[in-house]
Amino acid sequence: MHIEDGVLGVKSVIVNYAITAGLIVLGVQEIKRRVKENLYYKPFLAMVGVAVFVISAMHLPVPVTGSCSHPTGTPLAAILVGPFATVVISAIVLFFQAIFLGHGGITTIGANTVSMGIVGTFIGYFVWKLFRMFHSPIWLAAGLAGFIGDLATYLTTALQLAISLHGNVPLVTQWMIFFAGYGPTQLPLAMLEAIFTAIVVQIMVARRPDLLPGILMSNETRP
Amino acid sequence: MHPNATRSKQSAVPFFDRFTKVMLAAMFVLLLGVFSSAWYMSSHKMEGAGTDDVVNKMASKAASSESHPFIELPGDAELGAFSVANFFVGMIVGHYWTMLFGKNARKDENTAG
């Protein structure tokens, strides 16, 4: 989902940057609020931030499709530190990946943040909240959040490219053409992200539920 | 027995503690997946390129303009950049993990609770 410099049109670049900027403001507010509530939130945020950096740069090969791709880590981050704070983390991560690792571009930080840090994050978080509302076990809700958030990220990237580049081709056709480049490889990786997200959230809740206020329901005991 | 010997026995840090064993096991399982996938791709003459590259090339064709990353890392420079970044990321995650989830942190939590 790391779109490089040079392919998105100026309009698309500006719109994506504007959306990202708006949500970063809300993210900074969420961080400020949570820092006041929880003494451990700052180091926790730092740990989750660097974890997202490495997870979203971890290229894994998928043999059947003959290509490699990477998970995103943002649904996990959204569950742990909150969705708006995850937008801030994503923008920072994508900036450093662009300048240090040659991964993505500078003009596309906005677009890449929208796909990975906003859509993937919020859809993953919504799935987490939805399943927890229906008293789903933590591992199941977290796993589904990871799976759906991951695929949502790549669907969004394909859509961003399609909106910018579809020309005379119908938008949906172009969207599916771009997604066909990601989908077959991303599906097994989304499953891997689901397992990883489920395990990490379950372990963290078992060890330090106090770091994740509100994660356990009133009728639940520490796992 | 010398008192120092007893003390050092009590505070001895195991060479392979449970956490290290679990982490190494997870790493080997993942690497086994990577190696077997790479072997399959190599034996079937597959390129193994990243989907990001594949789609960026598709987008370049559609846009009729060349896509490019912010910096080019040719050859082993990319491996070097990833290794350096991931080394320090690992150190930072480990540092905060110990601070937040280590034995002392959990003791503090239990005391406070």
Image (tube, rainbow, N blue to C red):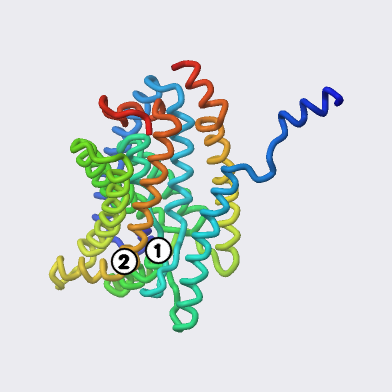
Do the residues at discs 2 and 1 belong to one chain? yes
Q: Secondary structure at mark 1?
A: strand
Dividing the image into 4 quarters, which one contains the N terminus of chain A?
Answer: bottom left
Q: Is residue A214 left or right of residue B44?
A: left
- The one nearer the camera, A86 or B30, is B30
Q: Amino acid at mark 2?
A: Tyr
- The one nearer the camera, B55 or A146, is A146
Give how far across and how far down residue B36 sits, in percent.
Answer: 49, 71
Give above or below for B110 relative to A140.
above
Q: Amino acid at mark 1?
A: Ser
Residue situated furthest right in the rendering: B2
Q: Are marks 2 and 1 in contact (CB under 8 Å)?
A: yes
Q: Quadrant of residue A139?
A: top left
Give above or below for A116 relative to B80.
above
Give how far across and how far down residue B75 sits, in percent.
Answer: 57, 69
Q: Residue at x 43, y 39 (%)?
A: A203
Q: Which residue is mark 2?
A: A182
Which numbered tag is attached to residue A184? none
Q: Residue at x 69, y 36 (%)?
A: B13
Q: Quadrant of residue A31?
A: top left
Label 1: few (<14), some or many (≥20) within 10 Å?
A: many
